[in-house]
Amino acid sequence: MNRLMIYGAAGYTGRMAAAHAQAAGLDLIVAGRDGERLAELGRALGAAHRVFPLDQDEAVEAALHDVAMVLNCAGPFLRTADPLMRGAIRAGAHYLDIAAELDSYRLAEAYDARARTAGVMLLPGSGGSVAMLGSLAGRAAERVSRPSAVRVALHVAGPMSRGSAISASENLAAECLQRVDGVLRPCEPSVTRAFDFGGGLVSCFPVTLPDLMTLWRELRAPDIGTFVYVSGNAFLTGDLAALPDGPTASEREDHRYQASVEVTGADGKAVRAVLDTVNGYSFTPMAAAEAARRVLAGEARPGFQTPAGLFGNGFAETIADTTIHILEDQR
């Protein structure tokens, strides 16, 4: 049993992930709720397709019974991660997703022991910003003896997909958090911090990113802050349901993503580094498909894992033309 199921395969990112998985020669099943679109996609890719909702546990478990892994590309993940994680654990299939929402990571933490007992891996954030920022912070942390503080920011450029915009709108009311002394605590969202993505300092605002959990899990730095810098028309307004699926290929090519990090060691040494990569909507499906390929090849550990923890700090640099530059070591 070496089959990959992509749930939400008919969506904007799901279609690209499915195409990358098919190009990698993976045994693919495209799945979701829209039977007509899935049948069309399956024919185009030469893949089987399955249609099932997520509100019936028995249907989810039955649909996953003969797959090695499910990659969840169906947001908002606050609605889809729980039933698919539970179904994957019951069916004995590894679970991956592309979530940038904290919910998937809290669920993975809550289901960690159950997944370990079942021999199932939970890998939320297998593609996207978590894979980017985990690799970036990990590379910087290699140069300090013991990380005590991490401050990391993501530069989001170009338009959002419809799915991301809807997910973001549903999470706007979520509490702004940071990690202080190892504990998640509220922070003031209006207090910005300056980061340099390679073109000079810019003001970034604090946001609750899942890296508050994943960086803590891998680096054990007690103080972690996550920030975002938005340029252009990345945050869309108006009737979100009427938006196009997502950025065009040319829009993705015109808007690369960057990330910046400062990692401070217990001795006061600080290391700064910058990541430059393709647009996030190009990076995410490529990284997710590559993660799926590697998991199917045997790179898996039961329980809650992170991309950098599982694949190493160099994972992001294997995707497209992603580069990480160490800018300075200072005390």
Image (tube, helix red, strand yellow):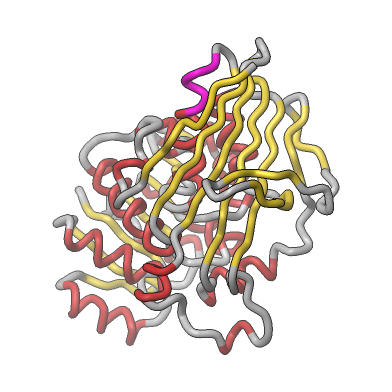
Q: Magenta region: which residues?
A: 140-144
Along the horizontal axis of the image, is 236 left or right of 2? right
Residue 312: percent from left, percent from top:
37, 30
Magenta part, dominant SS: loop
Whether residue 157 is situated above or below residue 204 in the rendered picture: below
Residue 62: percent from left, percent from top:
36, 61
> Tag count in the figure?
0
Residue 251: percent from left, percent from top:
42, 74
Whether residue 142 is situated above or below residue 276 in the rendered picture: above
Quadrant containing the C terminus in the rendered view:
top right
Residue sitting at x 32%, y 56%: 286
Residue 221 falls in which quadrant of the image?
A: top right
Along the horizontal axis of the image, is 50 left or right of 133? left
Residue sitting at x 53%, y 56%: 81
Confirm whether residue 120 shows in the render: yes
Confirm whether residue 88 shows in the render: no
Question: Which is more toward the observer, 7 or 195?
Answer: 195
Residue 302 falls in which quadrant of the image?
A: top left
Q: Is residue 289 magenta-colored? A: no
Residue 211 falls in which quadrant of the image?
A: top right
Along the horizontal axis of the image, is 46 left or right of 98? left
Residue sitting at x 33%, y 84%: 37
Residue sitting at x 53%, y 77%: 162
Question: Which is more toward the observer, 195 or 117?
Answer: 195
Q: Which residue is the extreme one toward the front?
A: 200
Question: Which is more toward the observer, 331 or 108?
Answer: 331
Q: Is residue 141 magenta-colored? A: yes
